[in-house]
Image (spheres, rainbow, N blue to C red):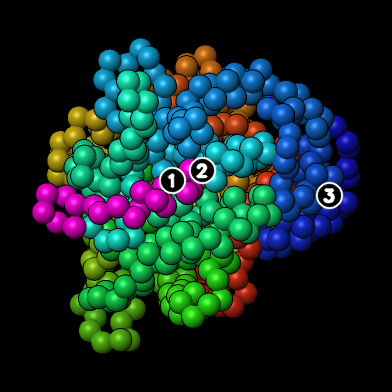
Amino acid sequence: MEAVNSSSSISELDDISRLLDRPRLNIERKRSFDERSFSEMGIFETVNSPGGRSGLETPVSSDRNSFEPHPMVAEAWDALRRSLVYLRGQPVGTVAAYDHASEEVLNYDQVFVRDFVPSALAFLMNGEPDIVKNFLLKTIQIQGREKKIDRFKLGEGAMPASFKILHDPIKKTDTVIADFGESAIGRVAPVESGFWWIVLLRAYTKSTGDTSLADTTECQKGMRLILSLCLSEGFDTFPTLLCADGCSMVDRRMGVYGYPIEIQALFFMALRSAMSMLKHDTEGKEFMERIVKRLHALSFHMRSYFWLDFQQLNDIYRYKTEEYSHTAVNKFNVIPDSIPEWVFDFMPLRGGYFIGNVSPARMDFRWFALGNCVAILGSLATPEQSAAIMDLIEERWEELVGEMPVKICHPAIESHEWRIVTGCDPKNTRWSYHNGGSWPVLLWLLTAACIKTGRPQIAKRAIDLTEARLLKDGWPEYYDGKSGRFIGKQARKFQTWSIAGYLVAKMLLEDPSHLGMISLEEDKQIKPVIKRSYSWTC
Ligand code: GLC
């Protein structure tokens, strides 16, 4: 490893942020941390390869930048390749889990759109874009089907949660069977599938430099259909997207109905990604105008009302209620007594985050990892907010990362609240699965957020934790317990996104230039919200 003194490390960090096409790092606030970070890890010389790599063998060796290849990397690649799904001889995706020991397959033998994202990124980073292209084309073709639940027809733009291929060895045919929510437990449509699809199309385009896929009539139309669904006008008074419970990664009833952060952050990122890929023809331009307006309103709403730090919490604690008229401070009429006890202890002086949900008289103060990391990646969070989110993760490491990265949400809901909120869901008992469980797949998002905010050392620490157990435990889907020590009650083994998430995290840390494919620089046109708040001014 190359030793770099602290002053040169700061200027090099400036260079990195420029090369990565991202906002300048807030160096003053976390200087001591950065002094130990990129420079110690010797990853400076690799940052400017906008197109990513291509044509390299698998796995790309980790001997660049003085990294020792970890034995888990080769194992992970083997396992990832075993999960591949073929359609007429071409790879089109990866199954959710390749767990032979599990008696119950349910739908884990399917290609989930959300689950395929880390697989796709791993393949792109490894210079294997074809499978990603096949997947994007196949899923957009599936979008074109008529989708019905009982007698009710879904919007044209809806994307599947998952699909599977049925091989008929006698007739020698392959049939694609898709699920838009009509078979899913709870019958919820995956609102984020379309967003992930757009984000992935941009990742493919960025990584390969090949704009021809995004330019095809199919992809342009597919994008417009997805956008039509989420930009349509109705009774909404907020720019956020109203959703049913369980419409994303948390696909069971968990009190995430309303305006969940995961959806809003992905919505924002997908809108911005679409902006960069829509053609400037009449239809494209019309959508671009609508997107610009929505982004403007959405960023204001999220940055103002979803953001919570010590100061903001104190303000809410002192809110008056029943204020009528547009001058109201407590706009949603949140009753201070509804603030849960835990949040007063949880909120550090340094740090902040986007809370889980905001709607009339309701603030869900829970922390959700995916939404906050995506908010950093899409630059929904301002640079100051991004830094504050990372501060929070550092300050509350035991709760948010614990022994197995990364906790899906914090804290768990228990007892009476669990009965009411989950409908007595035995899979989502406290500190298990979606209810405060730890999901290795989230490692890639944490790592990407760490790199974007100039804190690779945090990612390194999380990856080290993963390397101590994940392979040995057979790549579980999730872990249970307050600090994530136990393999999840019903966790699948050889869960593909746990495997791919690890690979993506490793590759991102080794070569931060990959970040460009899943990160968007701050949009200077979107004005920051000027607000008096502790963590924004320090
Ligand atoms: C579970 C998860 C969901 C995931 C699926 C396949 O249903 O809740 O997020 O996509 O498994 O892994």
Q: Earlier in the sequence, mark 1 or mark 3?
A: 3
x, y percent for residue 523: 60, 71
Q: Which dot marks residue 134?
A: 2
Mark-to-mark CA distance, 1 and 2? 6 Å
Is 46 located above or below residue 232 in the figure?
Answer: above
User: Residue 296 vs residue 3: left or right?
Assistant: left
Q: What amino acid type should be assigned to the residue bearing mark 1?
A: Lys
- Residue at 40% x, 35% y is 111
x, y percent for residue 198: 48, 56
User: Outermost residue, front direction?
Assistant: 171
- Residue at 60% x, 37% y is 123
Chain part drawn in magenta: 135-153
Say which element carries label 2.
helix
Mark-to-mark CA distance, 3 and 2? 41 Å
User: Residue 50 vs residue 213: left or right?
Assistant: right
- Residue at 62% x, 74% y is 524
x, y percent for residue 142: 36, 49
What is the crowding at mark 3: few (fewer than 14 residues within 10 Å), some, or many (at least 20)?
many
Report which residue position mark 3 lands on: 9
Is 27 located above or below residue 319 in the figure?
Answer: above
Q: Earlier in the sequence, mark 3 or mark 2?
A: 3
Mark-to-mark CA distance, 1 and 3? 45 Å
Report which residue position mark 1 lands on: 138
Say which element carries label 3.
helix
| Quarter of the image where one finds residue 74 | top right
Q: Where does the C terminus fall, quadrant-wise?
A: bottom right
Q: What amino acid type should be assigned to the residue bearing mark 2?
A: Asn
Circles 1 and 2: CB distance less than 8 Å? yes
Q: What amino acid type should be assigned to the residue bearing mark 3?
A: Ser
